[in-house]
Image: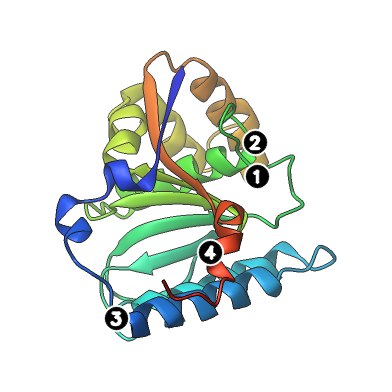
């Protein structure tokens, strides 16, 4: 596969680029982002860091219009509405900053975090027949990888052989029912054989530490 990494400015809807944020919004964003970064703790669990991401997104952007929580075994989801019964619009796989073994990188996607996203997407798209997933995200708080759901639909949901294996796995009709079996025996080899381009948006919050903590409003 060929990985194509895009910066946020290039992929952001042009309509958003025309909207000028006001100073109150900028300061609120800075305060919340600094809290997120300063609260990370290498000795704490993945669950601890997942909750940090959830709190940041709720306070900064989504409450009260969008419900954010876990769904099943998904780390985090952002719903399209303000209650748990509304459809899922964003699926987030959150890793702790020190979990380098399971975290994807700019050079390598075929690791557990991406395999987990694949399974969570198939559950939404195939099992729950959700056509309203818009984005899928992997983050370790510092690095953010954002994928368009149309990519996952084309690569995974429209592949009949993969969907058949997924359905058999979910129905308990394969050699094992553990998710690690799905990741190693189904997801990993399938992803390894992808020959097409995979495009994603990437940014690292650490690159913005200086302007983030700069008191000069200009």
Q: Position of residue 145 (x, y in %)?
A: 48, 45
Q: Which comes before the other along the chain, label 3 or label 1?
A: 3
Mark 2 vs mark 4, CA separation in Å: 44 Å
Task: Single out the mark in the foreground, 4 or 1.
Answer: 4
Q: Which comes before the other along the chain, label 2 or label 4?
A: 2
Q: Is residue 180 visible?
A: yes
Foreground residue among 124 and 15:
15
Q: Residues at badges 4 and 1 in contact (C-beta under 8 Å)?
A: no
Q: Position of residue 56 (x, y in %)?
A: 51, 75
Task: Single out the mark in the foreground, 3 or 1.
Answer: 3
- Residue 181's mark? 2
Mark 2 vs mark 3, CA separation in Å: 34 Å
Q: Which residue is mark 3?
A: 82
Foreground residue among 205 and 114:
205
Q: Which residue is mark 4?
A: 211
Q: Which residue is mark 1?
A: 178
Q: Which comes before the other along the chain, label 4 or label 3?
A: 3
Tell me which residue sits at (20%, 51%) in the image. 13
């Amino acid at each position: 596969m060929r990985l194509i990494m895009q910066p946020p400015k290039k992929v952001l809807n042009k309509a958003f680029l025309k909207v000028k944020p006001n100073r109150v919004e900028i300061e609120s964003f800075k305060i919340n982002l600094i809290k997120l970064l300063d609260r990370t703790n290498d000795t704490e669990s993945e669950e601890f860091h997942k909750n940090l991401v959830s709190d940041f997104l709720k306070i900064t952007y989504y409450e009260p219009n969008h419900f954010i929580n876990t769904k099943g075994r998904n780390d985090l989801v952002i719903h399209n509405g303000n209650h748990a019964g509304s459809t899922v619009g964003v699926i987030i796989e959150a890793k702790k900053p020190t979990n380098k073994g399971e975290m994807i990188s700019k050079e390598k996607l075929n690791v557990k975090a991406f395999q987990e996203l694949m399974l969570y997407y198939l559950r939404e798209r195939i099992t729950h027949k959700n056509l309203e997933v818009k984005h899928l995200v992997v983050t370790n708080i510092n690095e953010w990888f954002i994928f368009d759901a149309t990519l996952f639909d084309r690569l995974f949901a429209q592949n009949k052989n993969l969907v058949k294996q997924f359905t058999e796995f979910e129905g308990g009709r394969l050699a094992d029912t553990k998710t690690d079996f799905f990741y190693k025996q189904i997801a990993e080899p399938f992803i390894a054989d992808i020959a097409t381009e995979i495009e994603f948006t990437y940014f690292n919050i650490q690159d913005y530490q200086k302007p983030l903590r700069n008191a000069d409003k200009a």
